[in-house]
Image (tube, coloured by chain):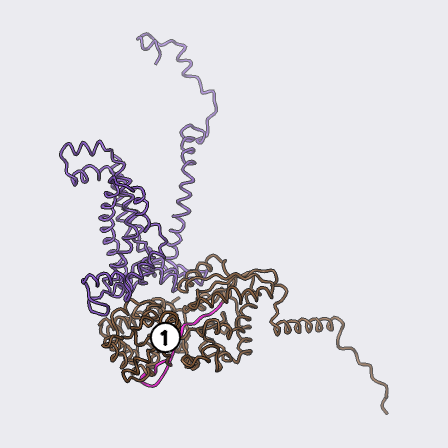
Chain colours: A brown, B purple
Amino acid sequence: MSDPRPVPVKASVSRRRFLTVAGAGVTTSALLTMLDARQAPAQIRGTTLRILQWSHFIPAYDAWFDSKFTKEWGDKNGVKVRVDHIPHLELPARMAAEFAAGAGHDIIMNASSILTRLYYRSLVDLSDIYSQGGKNHGGWIPAAGPLVEVEGKHYGIPMFYILLPMLYRKDLFDANGLKAPDTWELARVAARTLKPKGHPTGIQFSQCADANLNWRSLLFSFGGAEADPSGENILIDSKEMREALRFAKALFDEGMTPEVFSWDDASDNRFLASGIGSWIHDAISAYRTTEDTNPDVFKNTHIGLEPAGPGGKRVSVSSANVYMIWKFSKNQPAAKEFLAHFMDSGKEGMTQSRGYNMPYLLADAQKPMPVIGADPKMQILQDFPKIVAFYGYPGPFTTPIQEVVNLFVLPDMFTRVARGQAIEDVMKWGVGEYRRIFAKHKRA
Amino acid sequence: MTTASLRGGPEPTARAAVVSAPAPTAERAWWGTHSAQRKIFGYTLLAPAALYVLLLVGAPFLFSLWLAVSDANVGDPVARFIGLENFRAAWEMDTFWIAMRNSVVFLVVAAIFKSLLGTSLAFLLLQNFRGKKLIRGLVVIPFTLPIAISVLSWKWMYDSQFSVINWVLSRLGLIGTYGSDSWPIWLGQPHLALAACIAVNVWRTFPFSAIVLLAGFTSVPLEVIDAAKVDGCSFFQRFRHVVVPMIFPILMIGLLFDTVFTLSDLSVVYLLTQGGPGNASKILPVLAYQIGIQAGNLGRGAAIALFLVPLLLPALFLVLRNLKRREY
C-alpha cells in the first residue's frame, strides 16, 4: 500500500529566482502596456529631440507637423521637439557635415536620395520598430525594405513616398478624339497631335530629381532594368534601354519644345498651370499648384495610372523618403519613440499633405485612402502601391546607384539622344559611366 | 681709435694692458644675445598671423590633400591611402574634361567682362554728380545680396516660359513669340546655359571690381594727372601710362581675388542649371560637389577640387612676380 500522505516536494523556485522572474514580468508588462498605450518611458521626459527634414512641397503639412503633430507628442511625453527644415537637395550635404562633426540632429530625413548604405555604420539599428510597424500595419510594400536594409538590419524607417503619375488635360484629349494616356504610345500620339495646336508636352531633359525619376519610369515600363536584385550587376546595356531611348527621342521631336532642356523640378508644374501643357508626368504637387493658380485648367486636369510600356508593364519610380537616427544622438530612446509614433500616424500625414504622402505600410494603403480615396479624380492613385519602385530597380538603392543618380547619368543619356547623338554612342558613354562607378565601388 | 693715434703719437702702454685682459663677464647663451632677442621678438609678433594662416588655410589644404589620396567617403570614418588613384579616375572621366574646359571658359570670359564693366563703372563713379555717394552705395547691392535670392531672381528671368528678358525682346520684335524657334531657352541650350551662368557671375561681382578700381583711381594724385594733361596726353594715354602703373599693385590684388572668386563659384551654376543641360555648364566646383558630397565620394571630390590649383597657380605666379618686381 502506498503512503497516502502527500510527498513533500522540494521547492524548485528559489526566492531569488522568484524575484527575478516576477521583476522581469512586471517590467515586460509595463513596457507592453506603455507600447500599447504609446506611452513613452520616463527616461525620455525632460529631453530635447532635434529633427532635420525637408521643406515639404505642401506647406500646410509642415505647419501641421511642426506646430501640432510634434508638439502634441512632445507635450504628452515631456519631450521638447525642435524641427528644422532645409531644401531636400541640401540634405545630403547636411548629413555629411553632421557625420563629420559627430553632432547635429537626432533624427535626419533622407528625401529621394536615400543614403542608408553610405551611413549605416553610423546609424541606429531600427529593425525592432521596423518589424513592429510592419506587424501593426499589415506589412510593408516590397520596395520598402531594400531602401533601409543592410546586412539584414534596418537602419531607417520609410515613412512615405511621392508618386509621379500622368497629369493630362482631359478637355484637350476629348476635343481631339484622343484616348487617355494609359500607355506611353497613347501619350506620344497625344503629344504629336496636340503640339501643333499649341499644347506640347514636357518631361525634364535636364539634371533634376524629376528627370531621374521620370526617365526611369519610362525605362522600367519598357521592360528595362538598372541593376539585378543583388545590386551588383548592371543591366542597363539592353535592347529595352535602346528602345526607351528611341521612344524618348521620338517623343521629344514630335511633342516637346527645347524648353524641357532647362526645366527644373517645378517647371512642369508651371507649364501645366499655364494652360499650355497637354500632359506632364509629375507629382501631384503640380495638380495642387494648378488648383490654386488656375482653377479652369485644374477642372480639366485628370490623373492617370502609370502608362504601360510596349509589353503592358507598368513601373512607377517614386521619390522615397526615409527617417534615420544617428548613433551619436544622445536621445535615441526619444527618437525611436517618436519614429514609432510617426509610423503609426501615416494616415494623418496623408490627410495633412492633401494626398501627397503615399504609405509604405499595407494597412495604410488599403482603399479608400485618406483624401485620394474621396476624390474621384485622384482615386486612381490608390492603385500605385502595386507598381511602385525606386532607384536601382529591380535591385536595391545601393551606393553605386546613388552615385549614378547624383551624377544624373541616366537623364543625361536621354538628353544626349534627344539632342541628336546616335543611340549607340550614347549607350557607349552611359554604360561606360555605369561600369566605371560600379567598378570603383567594388574596388572600395 | 684714441685721440693719441689721431694725433699721430705713440699708444700709451696702459692701453695694451687693458685690451689683453680677459672678459670679466660669463659667456652669454645664444638666445641671450641682442640679435637673437630681436629675432625672437620679431617672430613672436609674427606668430599669431602665421598661426592664423596655418590653421585657417594650411590645415584645410593639407586635409584636402590627404582626402585626395585616400578612399575617404562620407559614411566611413576610416580612410585608406590609395595614392593617385582618385586623380587618375578623374582624368579618365569625360565629364571631368568638360568641366575643366567650362571652368577655363568661365574664368576667362567672366574676367574680360568684369574688367570692361568694372573699369567703365569705376570711371563713371569717379565723376562728380548729384547723389554720387548714394549711387556708389547702390552699385554694390548685387555683390552684397544673398546669392540664393539673387540667383533665384535670375532663374525666373531665364525661365523658359515666363522669361521677362524674352518677353521684352519679343515685344521689341527682336525674337519671335513663345514657342517659336527664335525664342531662346536660356538654361536649356548648351552655349546659352554657360553664357547665362557667366552673365550672372559677372553681374554679381563686377561691382567689386569697380570698387577696387575706384579705390585705386582715387589714390592717384590729381597733380600727376594734370601734369599729364598739360603734356598733351589723351585720356587713354593717361590711363595706360600714368594711372595703370600707379595702381598696378591694387589691380593685381583685385585680379587675384577675382580669379579665386570666379573659379570657386559653385553657387551660380549649381542653383541655375546644376551643371546641365547634359553637363554643358558643369564646372569643376559643381562636379567636385556632386561627386564629393552628393555621391559621398570625398576622396574623388577632393581630387577634382584640387585640379583648381593648377588653374589658379598661373594667376598667382603672375601677380606675385609683378608685385615683387615693382618693389625694386
With respect to residue B162, does B201 lie above or below? Answer: above
Q: Give left or right: position of B229 versus A286.
A: left
Q: Main secondary structure of the magenta part?
A: loop
Q: In this view of the protein, which residue sits in the foreground, A171 or B87?
A: A171
Q: Let me know if residue A314 is in the magenta part.
A: yes
Query: Helix, strand, or loop for circle 1?
Result: helix
Number of numbered discs? 1
Residue at position x 43%, y 73% from top? A356
Residue at position x 32%, y 78% from top? A169
Q: Mark 1 = which residue?
A: A298
Point out the image quarter for the C terminus of chain B. Answer: top left
Q: Let me know if residue A343 is in the magenta part.
A: no
Image quarter of residue B219: top left
Q: Give left or right: position of A4 versus A22.
A: right
Q: Position of residue A192 (x, y in %)?
A: 25, 79
Q: Residues within 10 Å of mark 1 (few under 14, many from 20)?
A: many
Magenta stretch, residue numbers? A305-323
Q: Position of residue A86 (x, y in %)?
A: 43, 61
Q: Position of residue A412 (x, y in %)?
A: 29, 69
Could one spot residue B172 in this view of the protein? yes
Amino acid at pointer 1:
Phe
With respect to residue B79, does B111 lie above or below? Answer: above
Chain holding disc 1: A
Q: Give left or right: position of B129 versus A323.
A: left
Could one spot residue A328 in this view of the protein? no
Q: In this view of the protein, which residue sits in the foreground, A319 or B1?
A: A319
Q: In this view of the protein, which residue sits in the foreground, A270 or A105?
A: A270
Q: In this view of the protein, which residue sits in the foreground, A341 or A178?
A: A178
With respect to residue B315, does B151 lie above or below? Answer: below
Point out the image quarter for the N terminus of chain B. Answer: top left
